[in-house]
Amino acid sequence: MGTPFISFLEPSKLDGYDKTKPHDQQGSHIPRVFVDVMELREGLWSKEQRQSFENQIDADDARSCHWVVYASVNETVEPEVRDEDGNVMRPRKSCTRNTPAGAIRLVPFPHGPLPKAGGRYDNGQLIDEKDGKPSEASSTGSTASMDRPTTFYDGREPYVKLGRLIVAKEFRGFGLSGLLVHTVLSWLKAKPAFFDPSITELGFEQIGASNETEMAKWGGLICVHAAENAAGSWKKWLFDLDPEMGKWWDNGVPTVALFKRLQLKDDREEEEREKEQGKGKKKEEEEEEKGKGKMKEKVGD
């Protein structure tokens, strides 16, 4: 495997994506990066876990950010041909293809109600234990209401949700999961206000605030819904298991929640200090240039 590289996709319109068809049968208007995301999901869920196409895309995909890591793979286009004596009649022809190797998704706030401990969910809907049908008002889709507090969540603070972490089977063991996670964490530190609502675009009424201090702003809290058997990896990346969230079943998979808080204040202060240092250095350079100009004037006189 060659040196991997990562592509980023901002929230995008996915209108017209046909859930009943595979990734390579979608319209040309679907962003290439998202098509590659779906190729990876199909490889994991359709082939390895035997799930349907419909469960592989949801309402959060269009409003989320996506990252895909690619690996350069050498593929044979035409095989080598030899004669009866072993002489090469036609050499092997190959080409290098950038193959989707892994993906991750970052969902902005707001989010739907926290999953119910012990609950069983099918494509985001809580299933009624009595009749096996989706319960009313049980969706985990986005809302802006208060929620129950847990060990690391107060039920009110805006948080972003990291998930849909996938690495293709043939590329596991190369550290690509960690590369994707740390890429997203670095991006969040650099752009902490990316998902904050815009007063200019939406206005206070649409945002649900009467003034700027009431606006929802992300303060560094990240949540992960992970398969129970994958929780160890998230702990390795310093996410903490939330015991009060309990365990629930998501499309038949035992699932738990983990949280992590990024320290954004210090990073922002450091960024401001770097800006001030840059301004100071620029001012010194300007003063130095002025000094050189005056020296030249004296020499000319």
Image: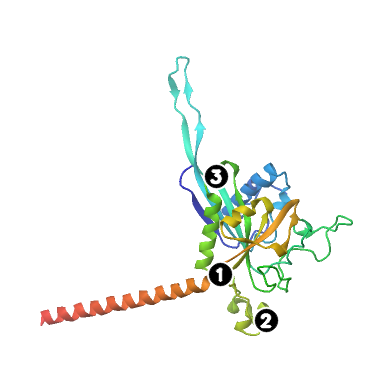
Residue mark closest to the camera, 2 vs 3: 3
Residue mark closest to the camera, 3 vs 1: 3
The local secondary structure at tag 1 comes to: loop
Amino acid type of the residue tagged 2 in the rendering:
Glu
The local secondary structure at tag 3 comes to: loop
Q: Of the numbered discs in the image, which one, if any, rests on residue 194?
A: 1
Which quadrant of the structure image shows residue 152? bottom right
How far apart are the alpha carbons under marks 2 and 3? 49 Å
Furthest residue toward top: 85
Amino acid type of the residue tagged 1 in the rendering:
Phe
Q: Of the numbered discs in the image, which one, if any, rests on residue 205?
A: 2
Q: Nearest the camera: 190 or 232?
A: 232
Give the answer, above or below, for where 144 lies relative to 104. below
Furthest residue toward bottom: 211
Amino acid type of the residue tagged 3 in the rendering:
Gly
Which quadrant of the structure image shows residue 292? bottom left
- Estimate the x, y position of residue 210 in percent, counting from the top left: 66, 85
Q: Residue at x 58, y 52 (%)?
A: 103
Q: Which residue has dot 3 on it? A: 173
Q: Earlier in the sequence, mark 3 or mark 1?
A: 3
Instruction: Count numbered badges in the picture.
Output: 3
Q: Earlier in the sequence, mark 2 or mark 3?
A: 3
The local secondary structure at tag 2 comes to: helix
| Pointer 3 with pointer 1, Cβ within 8 A | no
Q: Residue at x 67, y 50 (%)?
A: 229
- Estimate the x, y position of residue 44 in percent, counting from the top left: 65, 46
